[in-house]
Amino acid sequence: MTVEEVTETGSTRRRFYLGMIYGLWGIISAALALPSFVYLFLPPRARHEDEWVDAGDISRLDPKSPLELVFRRTRVDGWKIISEKTTAWVAKLANGKVVAYGPQCTHLGCAYHWDEGKSEFICPCHSTIFSIDGKVVAGPAPRPLDRFETRVEGNKLKLGKLQESPENNKA
């Protein structure tokens, strides 16, 4: 074998190995880049599921005596689907209408409770008092209690999105 033949063979073998190395690097780069590209530039599909949640049975609900219902709600946060437990204060008003209030005070988001003796909602943190219709009676809260959209089907209460109360004034 002459020196020229060895050089040509080495050069060919070297090109082959370099080609293999660059090819593997390309495959690895593509395998890493494709999922990253999809994650960064293609948003997740918006799920347009029915957002009404079955909160519970309201047949045991007495007028002028709110009941705290605990229910599970599924929330989509980007790629993550979260099932969380939440509560709502449900009251049957004098006119027979059923309303559901969010569980946080509108002042600083503290949890409030129903005082049966005084017939009012009380936030113990900052002494805000709400009437059974959610209006501010006393205290620093800037607006009435937030309300869930409600729908009654038979004895079942379905809750929609939590929204600010339509009455945006103090009582």
Image (cartoon, rainbow, N blue to C red):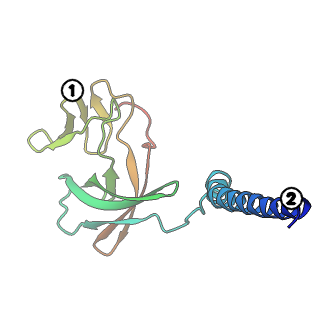
Res 132 visible: yes
Return the residue found at the far bottom: 154
Is mark 2 in CB contact (under 8 Å) with mark 1? no
Return the residue found at the far left: 117
Of residues 72 and 25, the one drawn nearer to the viewer in this rendering: 25
Number of numbered discs: 2
Above or below 105: residue 84: below
Q: Quadrant of residue 143?
A: top left
Q: Secondary structure at mark 2?
A: helix
Residue 107 screen position, x and y as percent: 34, 30
Q: Which mark is residue 7?
A: 2
Label 2: few (<14), some (14–19) or many (≥20) C-alpha neighbours in 10 Å:
few
| Type of the residue with mark 1 | Ser
Residue in view at x 36 percent, y 37 percent: 144
Residue in view at x 55 percent, y 66 percent: 48
Residue 34 screen position, x and y as percent: 67, 59
Image quadrant where one finds the N terminus: bottom right
Q: Earlier in the sequence, mark 2 or mark 1?
A: 2
Res 93 visible: no
Label 1: few (<14), some (14–19) or many (≥20) C-alpha neighbours in 10 Å:
few
Residue in view at x 19 percent, y 62 percent: 61
| Type of the residue with mark 2 | Thr
Return the residue found at the far front: 1
Residue 58 screen position, x and y as percent: 24, 66
Q: Secondary structure at mark 1?
A: loop
Q: Which mark is residue 103?
A: none
Residue 158 screen position, x and y as percent: 36, 65
Q: Which residue is mark 1?
A: 127
Of residues 42 and 126, the one drawn nearer to the viewer in this rendering: 42
Above or below 118: residue 72: below
